Image: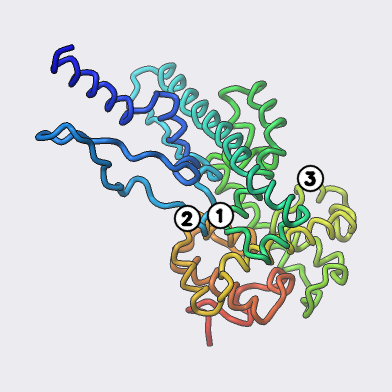
Amino acid sequence: MTTLTTRGLRTAALFQCAHPSQFQSQLISIPLFSQFSISKPPLQRNASTSTTTPSKPTATSPPRSTLNGPLSTLPAPLILPNRSDFESTFKYLFKLGSTYGSFYKTGALNIFTNFRASQAIQNNIDSNYQSSKAAAVKAGALSRADFQLLHRSWHDIKRLPIFGLVFIVCGEFTPLVVIALSNVVPWTCRIPRQINSDRQKLEDRRRISFRNLTAAPPTESNVEGLERQQLIHISWSLGLSSSVWDWLGGQYPGLPNAVLRRRVRRHVEYLEMDDGLLVGKKGGQKGMERLKGLGVEEVKMALVERGVDVLGRSEKVLRGDLEAWLRSREQAPVMRLLLTRPSVWPVKAKGLEG
């Protein structure tokens, strides 16, 4: 075997190490793998020697965040084609449909990826904490990223069968249908227009509910002591039940008290755990400093889950509201904050003080 042949085989082997298969490269493009997979650095060959050295880490592969939920639990970027770029309407509609199809396919793949990644975390909770997430959080066994992965994965898995049926029946017309059926759509499959529409509806309902809310907010964390009007307000403000139930009629239309109370109780428990994970064990000013590592979309999602308006507001104002919530939690229970506006919280956001 000649020297040229040996160098050729070595070059081919290095090429295989540095360039994985097409399928693997597609999976890595799904954001979860950038956080949960540890990829080997590509090998480089120096011009003067035949030895190989690992390349330096690049900015495109950041370390896994323990504060933000995995990127794969969020919708993938959606870039729609421009009508002006196509001569015929048919070609434009075909490209538009294929773009939406790719978006939903990526969302569905991310759901299964998230589910597989969450199994090890759930098995640890089942084995060591009697299947109690609250016990695992209290023991410091879960980061917020792990906690959000479990929470969002279960949210999406429950909705996948019905959404899959809608997609099979409606095909490329799915984006037009899901606006009216938002509750059956997994989070990873929600288009930006749908997300903004949902938030606008929530803020409108929240505004109406606050105008009609007359019951005094509770001073203790006791869901059992909430009146029906308060239960309905929290449900409206957070989107815990469909607006279809509002057509039942009566002075306070909606789901029965027992169902509302159970949903509110679960959400309050979720927020109590999430608040603790956001500020960390030390809390205080160091806990507030941690919030700087929270992504903008994560901040918006956290505020929506806490009944705070986010549309048309700057990032600085949004971060101030989240910090005000967490500081107020040191003095007031979750339910009291859910039943009051940020302007009357114990600790007000910067700009609202005084």
Residue 312 versus residue 77 in the image, above or below: below
Label 2 to label 1: alpha-carbon separation:
7 Å
Amino acid on which the number 1 mark rests in the picture = Ala
Q: Please identify, in this view, whether the residue under mark 1 or under mark 3 is nearer the observer.
A: 1
Residue 115 versus residue 304 in the image, above or below: above
Residue 14, quarter of the rendered image: top left
Picture coordinates of residue 168, whole percent (x, y): 65, 21
Badge 2 vs badge 1, beta-carbon distance below 8 Å: yes
Q: Earlier in the sequence, mark 2 or mark 1?
A: 2
Judge from the rendering whether residue 151 lies leftward or rightward of residue 229; answer left or right.
Answer: left
Local secondary structure at mark 1: helix
Residue 161, quarter of the rendered image: top right
Q: Earlier in the sequence, mark 2 or mark 3?
A: 2
Picture coordinates of residue 282, whole percent (x, y): 56, 76
- Which residue in the protein does label 1 denote? 145
Local secondary structure at mark 2: loop
Picture coordinates of residue 342, whole percent (x, y): 61, 74
Q: Earlier in the sequence, mark 1 or mark 3?
A: 1
Label 1 to label 3: alpha-carbon separation:
33 Å
Question: What label sits on residue 244 in the rendered view?
Answer: 3
Picture coordinates of residue 74, whole percent (x, y): 53, 45
- Is 340 in front, or is 68? 68
- Which residue in the protein does label 2 denote? 65
Label 2 to label 3: alpha-carbon separation:
38 Å
Badge 2 vs badge 3, beta-carbon distance below 8 Å: no
- Is 117 in front, or is 331? 117
Residue 315, quarter of the rendered image: bottom left
Amino acid on which the number 3 mark rests in the picture = Val
- Is 334 in front, or is 310? 334
Badge 1 vs badge 3, beta-carbon distance below 8 Å: no
